[in-house]
Image (tube, rainbow, N blue to C red):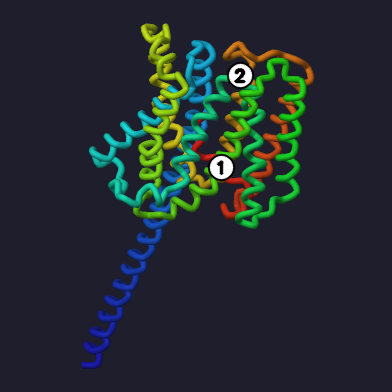
Amino acid sequence: METKANSRSDGITLDMSVNVHSMNNKDSNMVVNSRERHQMEDVTLYFKKIATALFYGLSSFMITVVNKTVLTSFRFPSFLFLSLGQLAASIIVLGIAKNLKLVSFSSLQNNTFGKIFPLPVIFLGNMMFGLGGTKALSLPMFAALRRFSILMTMLLELKILSVRPSVAIQISVYGMIGGALLAASDDLSFNMEGYTYVMITNVLTAANGVFVKKKLQTAEIGKYGLMFYNSLFMFMPALMITYCTGDLHETMAYDNWRNPYFVIQFLLSCFMGFILSYSTILCTQFNSALTTTIVGCLKNICVTYLGMFIGGDYVFSWLNCVGINVSVFASLLYTYVTFRRKQTPDKELLIPTTRGEAV
């Protein structure tokens, strides 16, 4: 009896040991599977970060080049009409995407305009004056003067959000501005109208960054809703401005409408207006404003040097060239300083991305 009892006890102990060992193996397998799953998610997220950053950089670079080709190389008479085309493209693309259930945003209501105001006005002004500056200035000067938007955004952030930039950030920003001023002091193709357009665009870009941050908190509208309604509400005012200035009549009489190469470039510019806004949202979504700012700075460097050969309106002088290169070097310094602070929360980035640029 005692032997049987011991045998039964040993059997139970053995079964419990086997069960515990089996449970430990299952737990171990679960831990391994969970680790592998997290690794796969990390790889996927990393790929999305790289892909969206490249997408934004390429989109921002391409629309600047395409706009410059349309407005300068083809001598298209109206940047106002081109901005009208970009508004129409955003409305059409987002409207179709919503009907196909590819994106979702709330339907138009009586208080929709009030919810997103003043973003539509800022959006339209940013697009129009940005295109005007692109037409009137060479790309190197345009890229150099656009760096003033960083200073304006920094000051606006300091005043509204009480965010104080570091010394390194201030040095890099002031270097960009100093280089731009040096280049402007000997700009042999000086165009007061173009300078005015770019500086207005810089102010609107700074305001756009601050208000987008606030309006994106309106969940019932969402980021796609902001893009759609900004374009929808401003289409008729933009059409009226184009008509009253005579640009609509001048555009209809333009000779190159039968030139298929120009038509392709024009349609590409319209579509790229939407792509730029969309790529900015994606880049910021997966990388935060930090990477968007870095990619924007790197893109402007490419635009600066390529612009010396595209458009045919850059006039070389040593002082102008030195000033542009000083501004480029300061942009690289700003990029390095910002990248080194990559573990810092977004709210301490100090200079938010200039999202929503039309050029």
Answer whether residue 86 is visible to the viewer in this image: no
Q: Residues within 10 Å of mark 1 (few under 14, many from 20)?
A: many
Instruction: Residue at 61%, 56% (x, y): give it.
Output: 161
x then y, percent, for residue 102: 28, 40
- Residue linked to disc 1: 353
Residue beneath the point at 72% across and 51% down: 166
Quarter placement of the N terminus: bottom left
Image position of 314 with respect to 130: above or below: above
Which amino acid lies under the numbered mark 2 shown in the image of this protein? Gly
Q: Which mark is residue 162?
A: none
Looking at the image, residue 87 lies above or below residue 266: below
**Residue 253, percent across and down?**
40, 10
**Residue 307 bears which disc, if any?**
2
* Gap between marks 2 and 1 measured at Cα: 22 Å
Residue closest to the eye, 311 or 287: 311
| Disc on the earlier residue, 2 or 1 | 2
What is the x, y in percent for residue 129?
54, 29
For this view, does 264 lie left or right of residue 338? Answer: left
Q: Is residue 310 above or below residue 196?
A: above
Across and down, in percent, residue 346 comes to 57, 52
Label 1 element class: loop
Residue found 69% across the figure and 19% down from its top: 190
Q: In terms of depth relative to the viewer, which is nearer, 4 or 345?
A: 345
What residue type is disc 1 on? Thr
Describe the element under mark 2 as helix, strand or loop. loop
Observer-nearest of 296 and 194 = 194
Horizontal arrangement in the rendering, residue 180 relative to residue 22 (left or right): right
Going by the image, does 70 lie left or right of 10? Answer: right
Q: Quarter-wise, where is residue 248 in the image?
A: top left
